[in-house]
Image: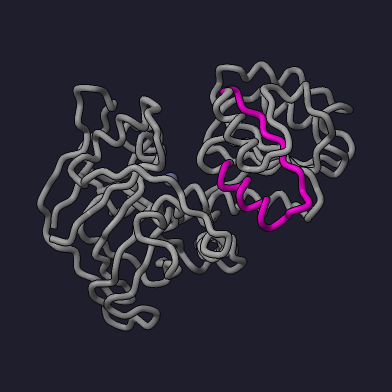
Amino acid sequence: MKAMVLEKIALITDTSAPLRLRTLPDPQPAEKEILIQVSACGVCHTELDEIEGRTPPPLLPMILGHQVVGKVLRCGPNTRRFRAGDRVGVAWIFSTCGDCAFCRQELENLCEDFCGTGRDANGGYAELMRVSEAFAFRIPESISDLHAAPLLCAGAIGYRSLRLTQLMDGQSLGLTGFGASAHLVLKMVRYKYPASKVYVFARSEKERRFALELGACWAGDTADETPEKLDAVIDTTPAWKPVVEALKNLKGNGRLVINAIRKEDRDKNWLLNLDYPVHLWMEKEIKSVANVARSDVADFLALAAQIPIIPEVETFALAEANKALLELKQRKIRGAKVLVIDAA
Ligand SMILES: [Zn+2]
Ligand SMILES: [Zn+2]
């Protein structure tokens, strides 16, 4: 099979091409695994972190890609869930131990043995991919392969962050930062909690306009201007100032959910502005989001089919993965970037 392979950690620049097109032996499905003929694989910011070494694969070479859609080509021994020809997807959660306290409580996203697709195990920048059948998802019929791929990461993590806010219909929600995941959250809220008002904080004028088009009741630059206190806030920024501002804006019993893999040190001093009575008193809570559990992916796909959510996409051939990643790094974004992989 053909695959785009990461062989060594490198910076992505105009002149570097960190992923190499290689021909590798076809993977074989082991016990309880399925072999997928990949047709589409979304390109995610996390891949930039993997390639540039901020969250490097523990072993190289590695095939990246964790928003994988395709058809089951073959089932390994003792598989039950799928048959050849079924449309399936694979998300960031590739496998977990299945046995620890977290795994037994459907908090498998917190398992110590959590393996990320395309970082800890070969992913979908390839013609073929194998995965345990327990970690593959059926794709709803109404969503095409191409449109399903970008939903598997930003959508599932957005779904989890919304779930962690414990929002109820009618309660107000703030979104700090308005990237792919936040705009999917806004679409979900409009559908699931029609009486809830959504406030969007974004630095770019374009993002604010987009938020209002999608049904936000208010969009502004800084939290100082918010017209009302909020029941919950989801923060997707890499900075600290929004955390402090969000806490100030929460009502008593309000919850701040931080959906960010890491925070930058640049404005860490903002934390010194934390004032206990203003920012924390009155049982305000802070919770971070880590990875996704299988139920987030499955529940989100069902919801996306219902609403429906059809993401805007921009397609690339498998061999153009470096170009897609460079554009993502340079923020040349016209829609979710998806590698389209033709059956050989
Ligand atoms: Zn991702
Ligand atoms: Zn576990």
| Residue 48 among those drawn in magenta | no
Q: Which residue sits at x=39%, y=35%?
A: 334
Dividing the picture into quadrants, the one containing residue 256 is: top right
Q: Which percent across, then down, holds residue 213?
A: 61, 38
Q: Which percent across, then down, holds residue 189?
A: 67, 51
Q: Which residue sits at x=89%, y=28%?
A: 277
User: Is 4 placed left or right of 303 in the picture?
Assistant: left
Q: How is the image coloured?
A: one colour
Would you say residue 296 is visible in this rendering?
A: no
Residue 84 to residue 176: above or below = below
Ligand 1 location (quadrant): top left
Name of the residue lying farthest toward the front? 213
User: Is 181 placed left or right of 341 in the picture?
Assistant: right
Q: Who is closer to the viewer here, 174 or 10?
A: 174
Q: Which percent across, then down, holds residue 188?
A: 62, 53
Q: Who is closer to the viewer here, 142 or 183?
A: 142
Q: Which residue sits at x=14%, y=44%?
A: 21
Would you say residue 331 is visible in this rendering?
A: yes
Residue 308 to residue 271: above or below = below
Q: Which percent across, then down, holds residue 6?
A: 23, 41
| Residue 189 among those drawn in magenta | yes
Residue 310 to residue 36: above or below = above
> Dividing the image into 4 quarters, which one contains the N terminus?
bottom left
Dividing the picture into quadrants, the one containing residue 210 is: top right
Counting labels gives 0
Where does the magenta region start and end?
183-204
Dividing the picture into quadrants, the one containing residue 4 is: top left
